Amino acid sequence: MFEHVQAAPPDAILGLNEAFARDENSEKINLSVGVFKDGSGQTPILACVKAAEQSLVQTETSKNYLGIDGLPGFRQLVPSLLLGDDHVAIGEERIACLQTPGGTGGLRVAADLIATLLPNATMWCSQPTWPNHPKVFAAAGLRVQNYPYLDMSTNQLDIEAMLAKLETIPSGDVVCLHASCHNPSGVDPTPVQWQSLATLISNRGLIPVVDCAYQGFGNGLEEDVYGLRTLCEACPEVFVCNSFSKNFGMYSERIGGLTLVAGKSETAKALGSHAKACVRANYSNPPKHGAAVVAEILGSTELSQQWNSELSGMRDRIHHVREEFVTKMSQRVPDRDFSFIKEQKGMFSFSGLNPMQVDRLRNEFSIYIVGSGRINVAGITPTNIDRLCDSIATVL
């Protein structure tokens, strides 16, 4: 019955990773998939994660199923990390938190929840956005539209166009926002712009879904959730999907969360119950190990301090790579301004390369970049940066 089925096209990002693995060039460079790499090109396991795992080996007594909403200790700690220990919504129990299989799992549960409770709502995503956003939302049955975000001519946030479009979106629709380190552009709103966005979204009766995948990778753990906390002050209901893949280096453990912030405690409980129904019909309940590691670290003063230090080191490396890349490219192509790359936040940046130049980099130099020109700056190392800059200068 399936002989007529043609192969699906490869994923725009993960497909590149597969092509990179097949490439036999010993000098190949992968700047496509969003994973942190250290100066030697490796994705390390954090020392605090190793310490937490060792503790769990000694104390864990069961591999029984978790509840539908996940590990209780994890669910208690995540809202505090996102919103702060003293946030009024936590004190008033206006929050429901579920552990999910990565940030992507949180997005899908949020999408299923919205499709169940607001079947006529449209999901609005930034243009550009993470390529998997519209796929996840559409797979849940939601209509997906775009709002302006990046001015490609200046590589800056087009806040006027963004606000103007949001002003026209019908009340009850849903807006997907990046908490920080916007993927793929690396361009974030300023605090003043976040205030304007929060006020407009609240006044229009829109529901924000905030993708918080890179907390701590931009300016710091507190600074990177300024926009999220501003939205929670202005809006009665906010959905937050967060990931621990990047800031804990736990990519393979698929650990994330969905935090539902509501105006009333009863509303939060009701939303949580419907979210659990969505989970039950999907993956039933989440895996334990990653959540247990995160809970062990966040629940320990010593391990939390160690994590903060290691996270700061990862963030500093990304900042340094951006500065070095801009300097070296300016030397090779002096008539082109690359300074915007230094100003962007997180692992990703729009390089300004067009699809033809991206193809040349892959075919001629075994340098793998997403077709949009997005690069993972964390994939740049001391041993490959000169070859990378020489190659980009050639295709430019």
Image (cartoon, rainbow, N blue to C red):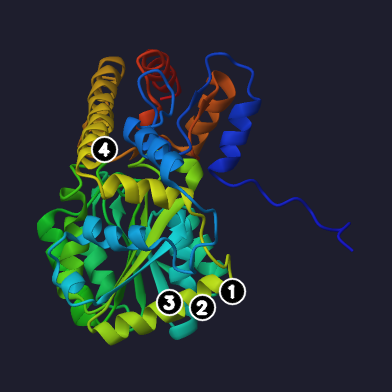
Quadrant in which the C terminus appears: top left
Q: Residue at x 58, y 65 (%)?
A: 283
Circle 3 crowding by C-alpha within 10 Å: few under 14, some 14–19, many from 20: many
Q: Looking at this view, is 353 or 311 the one in front?
A: 311
Q: Is residue 385 left or right of residue 135?
A: left
Q: Quadrant of residue 78?
A: bottom left
Tell us which disc is closer to us: 4 or 1.
Answer: 4
Q: Secondary structure at mark 1?
A: loop
User: Marks 2 and 1: in contact by CB < 8 Å?
Assistant: yes
Q: Is residue 269 above or below residue 20?
A: below
Circle 1 crowding by C-alpha within 10 Å: few under 14, some 14–19, many from 20: few
Q: Residue at x 45, y 37 (%)?
A: 354
Q: Quote the CA–CA distance across marks 1 and 2.
A: 6 Å
Q: Looking at this view, is 11 or 228 the one in front?
A: 228
Pointer 4: what residue? 307
Pointer 3: what residue? 122
Q: Secondary structure at mark 2?
A: helix
Residue 275: give x, y in percent of width and height. Answer: 45, 75
Residue 288: give x, y in percent of width and height. Answer: 48, 54
**Pointer 4 or 2: first along the chain:** 2
Q: Is residue 55 visible?
A: yes
What amino acid is found at the position of numbered circle 3 in the picture?
Thr
Q: Quote the CA–CA distance across marks 4 and 1.
A: 35 Å
Q: Looking at this view, is 88 or 209 the one in front?
A: 88
Q: Is residue 190 left or right of residue 64?
A: left
Residue 69: give x, y in percent of width and height. Answer: 44, 68
Q: Residue at x 55, y 31 (%)?
A: 359
Q: Quadrant of residue 378?
A: top left
Tell us which disc is closer to us: 2 or 3.
Answer: 2
Pointer 1: what residue? 281
